[in-house]
Amino acid sequence: MIKFQSIFKENKKKFLFIFLLLLVSFLYGYPEILSFRPYSIHQWRQSDCLSIAVNYYKDDLNFFEPAVHWVGTADGKTVSECPIIYYTVAQLWKIFGYHEFIFRIVNVFIVFLGLYCFYKLVYGLLSDYFWAFSIPIFLFTSPILVFYSNNFTADAPAFGLALVGCYLLWSSIKKGQKVRYYASFLFFLLAGLIKISSLISFIAILLIHVYSIFFSEKKRLWFYKWYNVLPYFFVFAVLIAWYKYAIFYNQNNVSGVFLTGIYPIWDLDQSAIKNIWLSLKNDLLPAYFNNKALSILLILFVTLFFFYKKVNKYLFYLTLLVFLGVLVYLILFYQAFTVHDYYLTNLLIFIPLPLITLLEMLSRNYNRYFHKIQLKIFFAATVLLLTYETAVINRAKYFINDKLVRTNFVVSDGFVNQWVNFHREYASKLKVYENLTPHLRKLGIKRSDRVLSLQDHSINISLCFMDQKGFTAFGYGDLTLDKRMQLYKQNGVQYLVSDTSYYFDQKTIHSYVQSKIGHFQNIGIYLLK
């Protein structure tokens, strides 16, 4: 007991930050959300990620041969990002049993580890616990970071790993610990393998490091030796090797399911550019970060140029290069910003940088302003308000009658009603797929028996929920129904799974059906000819 008290006393600030993180997560609805299957916005992409993990687990696949439930013409073998998390989750399921909440917990843990390391980094830079606590929590008010952390997608954990890499690299320089220096590259590598967009800060650090080696006056220190650049190139070499393999794997199996290239702005005409800009501005940016807070951060960023002689040059150029990296990324993947808000997750690395750089400058040059209680009260109030707003937004995406959402004063009734309608529509038509698997097995349909889920236009949503190999309406849209049905038959499809109302509306499909063999709620199961 005495030992525990001693440990707590020595680390009470760390425990306090962890407590704050858990408290905020509770407000966001994290404990209840852990039990959800892929749900809400971008259920399509969530199901793709879960599908890869499930197939690793159920089929005991080799790490380098991932597959999804949608089989295509090559047993569903396809790959997106490096499946490090998916494969790890599959191994955990082999130990603890198949529980989808384990997948969510893994992603949450990685993001929380990143935020914890970020807390230590901020304290190391500013030597002030208020800012060390509040700035990471401020970052964790981003609606997309909050939503995709407790989720199945890979963007948020990649961001978390990059934050760990940043902390380890900084602490290795600060304390002269070479082990941490090399460990930082491992985390950057993992982050980049999962999502290449997570390396914006890494590339910025590389440019600063190379410049420092040639022009720094501190060349006697180990960090400024030329050979310390080599780990950067090792990271890039592994990344290039992986992405070459991913492209090769998809070309020789199922291609066109996942993006392994870029979506640049220069492939669009003026009208398309304008439409995507409106979508980005009106829909995606509010999900990225609160508009007013983002505007203030951009003002702070511009302010740094007026204090150029007084700001920390390393922090200034890191902020500037990250900002330029964000712009380059937006140009390279501009076509994705119609609805794909998760593409913005790793751009959150810019959010705290202008604030940290300005505060670090105040701490050295205007110390009394840095410690101003009014400034801290204002920032604390801002963080509390943003936390409340994000809690409302996140809970609205999951819960139809949440009291916090119903009584809120920060989001519009239109936003709330949009999600209420979504939940009702989903419950009446699609939720049945989440519980359909036992009925299919009673009918003698094994998970390897291929089915056609014709009303599902996603790749894997219904197939993943049913844990059933087969096809959906995704792909082959250029073929006539007759040719598509021939293709499905050639690839082993035996059964049609369909909402009965949809089935009766689609008269043309009847000629391909032999008999109805089962019924579960609003779903009919049919044997194909």
Image (spheres, rainbow, N blue to C red):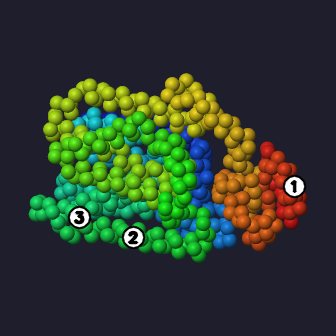
Q: Where residue 275 sits in the image (x, y, percent)?
A: 55, 49
Mark linked to residue 210: 3
Mark 1 or 2: in front is: 1
**Residue 318 horizontal side relative to residue 279, left or right:** left
Query: At x 73% / y 40%, what residue is drawn?
Result: 428
Q: Label 1, label 2: how many angstroms apart (C-alpha)?
A: 52 Å
Q: Earlier in the sequence, mark 1 or mark 3?
A: 3
Query: At x 28% / y 58%, what residue is drawn?
Result: 205
Query: At x 55% / y 24%, what residue is drawn?
Result: 407
Which type of secondary structure does the marked residue at label 1 adopt?
A: helix
Q: Amino acid at mark 2?
A: Val
Q: Amino acid at mark 3?
A: Val
The crowding category of the residue bearing disc 2, from other C-alpha atoms within 10 Å (few below 14, some 14 to 19, many at least 20), is some
Query: At x 15% / y 40%, what residue is drawn?
Result: 364
Check disc 2 and report the residue beneath it: 238
Q: Where residue 435 sits in the image (x, y, percent)?
A: 70, 47
Q: Amino acid at mark 1?
A: Lys
Mark linked to residue 296: none
Q: Where residue 394 sits in the image (x, y, percent)?
A: 52, 37
Furthest toward the front, the residue is 270
Would residue 285 be seen by someone viewing this image from the given angle?
A: yes
Check disc 1 and report the residue beneath it: 507
Q: Is residue 248 above or below residue 390?
A: below
**Residue 493 horizontal side relative to residue 161, left or right:** right
Which type of secondary structure does the marked residue at label 2 adopt?
A: helix
In the image, 176 versus 482, the foreground residue is 482
Q: Earlier in the sequence, mark 1 or mark 2?
A: 2
Q: Earlier in the sequence, mark 3 or mark 2?
A: 3
**Residue 483 horizontal side relative to residue 177, left or right:** right
Mark 3 or 2: in front is: 3
Which type of secondary structure does the marked residue at label 3 adopt?
A: helix
